[in-house]
């Protein structure tokens, strides 16, 4: 960690040329960050929380720099969004060019290349070589909502099956699809009907094989919902907010087989796992499954708001003309950003980089686990890795410990995030642009925090 005092930055160029170092030059939060949070309390609705109390002025590679000149190691990527790196030069150039050309027409009023280019790229990159169609939206939740609309229209059925620990967003329908009450749903009901929750495969906690866990879920669907009423099974191939739960091998394949046999639409929510994050372009590939419909967002557009539903042509095309869309969906600036980011995913070795990051994270964390029984589980794939912290005596989740470690990391210049139904999962989601030295430094701080807690 550098101790050289950097001048406070008010407006800085971000991107990979920022010094890739952890550097604290004030207490945190520093005075400028504190000033922003005083204004925030008076101006911003209390429900909009901020996990890391800093006032960001620049970010790039593996660092986030605040207004006081502190440089934090970024182990969160704004929740898996800045996978190509913040202010990626290709994204900046593409956005700059597009902004100067035109910023908006509303694609459903007047079309442009960028939207169709992104649709073609998604049709090519998502799993399976069948004929596909894509529709673009703004947020992950909006993509999931539209995937549900399309599945219902296609099947003429209403029931949507989701899983324990699932997270699909915070709009009214996606709150119903999301499992965890606090903070996502508490007091915000009534929720949308015809949503049925079944058990997820959670190998650390249920000890079941993939086929056993699938049998349990399918039996519940058949007994409590009925295949003939089920429009879609919606699942994250690796659960994100739910705690980076990687289902046991064979779970997703068995579900996929059951959906095919029963004309149910299999929707893979790859909003968090998509675009190289897990060491494959899409996490479904690890299990060899070909979903009927895939939802994407987050990493796709390098930080600009863009999401998509991509699926089998015969499913996607059942929605009537005018049934899908929205004012901003597939905005030209976001599409330009996505095309640049997708170019980086495909041509800058980012899938391989995610795997390398995973090797470093898993190696270090598994070594730490051998001498620290509070690390109950180490899991994940690629640059989506987590540890589950527990009471070594009882195996009970330890959210208090998890919170203390995250706090320590912040106070020592590292942005680390929690997750999980029980709040006891510490997750590592670094930008794929982070270098090894910075990654190892950030990881060491987190493990110091665990030792100190
Ligand atoms: C798997 C998954 N689906 C949907 C969403 C919702 O995305 P957004 O926050 O862009 O609405 C998220 C966000 O974390 C997610 O992880």
Image (cartoon, rainbow, N blue to C red):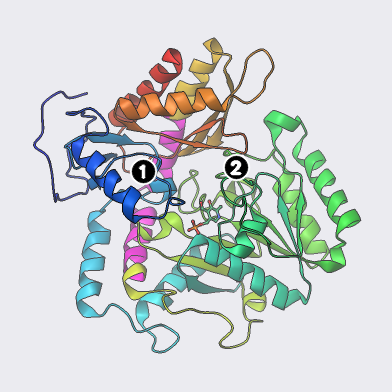
Q: Is residue 352 magenta?
A: yes
Q: Is residue 324 magenta?
A: no
Which stretch is magenta? 335-360
Q: Residue at x 35, y 66 (%)?
A: 339
User: Are there few (<14), some (14-19), or many (20+) residues within 10 Å of tag 2?
Assistant: many
Give the quarter of the image for residue 224.
Answer: bottom right
User: Are there few (<14), some (14-19), or many (20+) residues within 10 Å of tag 1?
Assistant: many
Q: Secondary structure at mark 2?
A: loop
- Residue nearer the viewer, 9 or 284: 9
Q: Residue at x 53, y 10 (%)?
A: 371
Point out the residue furthest to the right here: 223
| Quarter of the figure with the C terminus | top left
Q: Secondary structure at mark 1?
A: loop
Point out the residue furthest to the top here: 371
**For marks 2 and 1 on the same chain, the one whose residue lies earlier in the sequence:** 2
Badge 1 is on which residue? 431
Report how far apart the C-alphas of labels 2 and 1 lie in the structure. Answer: 20 Å
Q: Nearer the viewer, mark 2 or mark 1?
A: 2
Point out the residue furthest to the front here: 42
- Image mark count: 2
Q: Could one spot residue 115 in this view of the protein?
A: yes
Provide the major secondary structure of the magenta segment. Answer: helix
Badge 2 is on which residue? 242
């Amino acid at each position: 960690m550098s101790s050289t005092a950097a001048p406070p930055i008010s407006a800085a160029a971000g991107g990979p040329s920022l010094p890739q170092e952890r550097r604290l030059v004030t207490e945190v939060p520093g005075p400028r960050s504190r000033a922003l949070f005083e204004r925030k309390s008076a101006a911003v609705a209390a429900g909009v929380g901020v996990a890391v109390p800093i006032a960001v002025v620049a970010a790039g590679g593996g660092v986030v720099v605040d207004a006081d000149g502190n440089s934090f190691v970024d182990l969160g990527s704004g929740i898996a969004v800045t996978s190509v790196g913040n202010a990626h030069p290709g994204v900046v150039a593409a956005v700059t060019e597009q902004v100067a050309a035109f910023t908006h027409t509303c694609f459903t009023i007047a079309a442009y290349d960028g939207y169709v280019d992104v649709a073609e790229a998604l049709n090519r990159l998502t799993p399976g070589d069948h004929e596909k169609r894509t529709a673009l939206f703004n947020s992950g939740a909006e993509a999931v909502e539209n995937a549900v609309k399309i599945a219902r229209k296609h099947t003429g059925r209403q029931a949507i099956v989701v899983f324990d620990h699932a997270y699909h967003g915070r709009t009214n329908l996606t709150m119903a699809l999301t499992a965890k009450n606090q903070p996502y749903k508490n007091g915000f009901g009534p929720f949308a009907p015809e949503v049925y929750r079944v058990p997820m495969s959670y190998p650390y906690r249920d000890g079941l094989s993939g086929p056993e866990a699938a049998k349990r879920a399918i039996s519940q669907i058949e007994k409590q919902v009925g295949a003939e009423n089920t429009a879609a099974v919606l699942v994250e191939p690796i659960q994100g907010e739910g705690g980076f739960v990687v289902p046991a091998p064979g779970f997703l394949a068995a579900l996929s087989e059951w959906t095919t046999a029963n004309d149910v639409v299999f929707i893979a929510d790859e909003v968090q796992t998509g675009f190289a994050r897990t060491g494959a372009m899409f996490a479904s590939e690890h299990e060899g499954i070909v979903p009927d419909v895939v939802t994407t967002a987050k990493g796709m557009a390098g930080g600009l708001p863009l999401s998509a539903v991509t699926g089998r042509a015969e499913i996607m095309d059942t929605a009537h003309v005018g049934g899908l869309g929205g004012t901003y969906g597939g905005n030209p600036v976001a599409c330009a950003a996505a095309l640049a980011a997708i170019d980086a995913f495909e041509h800058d070795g980012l899938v391989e980089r995610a795997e390398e990051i995973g090797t470093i994270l898993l190696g270090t964390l598994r070594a730490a686990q051998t001498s620290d029984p509070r690390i109950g589980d180490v899991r994940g794939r690629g640059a989506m890795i987590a540890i589950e912290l527990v009471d070594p005596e009882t195996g009970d989740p330890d959210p208090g410990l998890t919170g203390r470690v995250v706090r320590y990391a912040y106070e020592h210049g590292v942005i680390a995030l929690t997750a999980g139904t029980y709040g006891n999962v510490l997750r590592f989601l670094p930008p794929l642009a982070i270098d090894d030295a910075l990654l190892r430094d950030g990881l060491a701080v987190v493990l110091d925090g665990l030792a100190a807690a």
